[in-house]
Amino acid sequence: MHFRQSHFEKQKISDDFEKSQKKKVRVKKQEFFHTHFAIGGAPDWTVFALCVLFTLVWARIAAVFANKASPKTLNRATGVVLVILGVAIMLFNVLT
């Protein structure tokens, strides 16, 4: 027995699939929208601008240092920074 779909049946299946895909995208966008505002809305723009500024300034300083230093010195500097960050995180966990 051979099953043939008419053009209209194929179109309906295609339309149903397209609707389901759009619905999935819409749900994902809504979830993102709700989770973004769950943290308290828009950021403090002054703090945001300062974060961007200091990131750019310190990235430039780090690039100058990295271009002048040897690989051994860079490895040591990376280790020191990671240790300091680890200690800071542990202190915050203990204090809170």
Image (cartoon, rainbow, N blue to C red):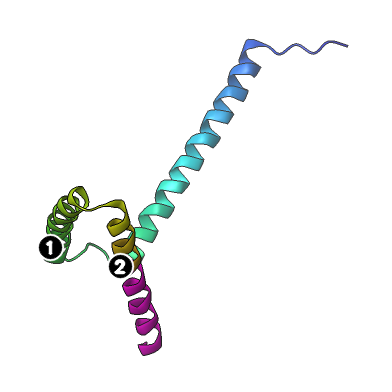
User: SS class of the residue under badge 2?
Assistant: helix
- Above or below residue 80? Residue 54 is above
CA gap, disc 1 and disc 2: 21 Å
Q: Residue at x 44, y 43 (%)?
A: 26
Judged left or right of residue 60, residue 86 is right
Residue in the foreground of this view, choosing between 6 and 75: 75
- Res. 81 mark: 2
Q: Residue at x 14, y 60 (%)?
A: 54
Q: Which residues are magenta?
A: 80-96
Residue 95 magenta-highlighted: yes
- Above or below residue 46? Residue 14 is above
Quarter holding the C terminus is: bottom left
- Res. 5 mark: none
Q: Amino acid at mark 1?
A: Leu
Residue in the foreground of this view, choosing between 32 and 19: 32
Judged left or right of residue 66, residue 15 is right
| Image quadrant in which you'd find residue 33 | bottom left
Label located before the other in sequence (1 or 2)? 1
| Image quadrant in which you'd find residue 7 | top right
Q: Residues within 10 Å of mark 1 (few under 14, many from 20)?
A: few
Residue named by callout 1: 50
Residue 70: where, in percent of width, then height? 26, 52
Can residue 66 be seen at all in this image of the molecule? Answer: yes
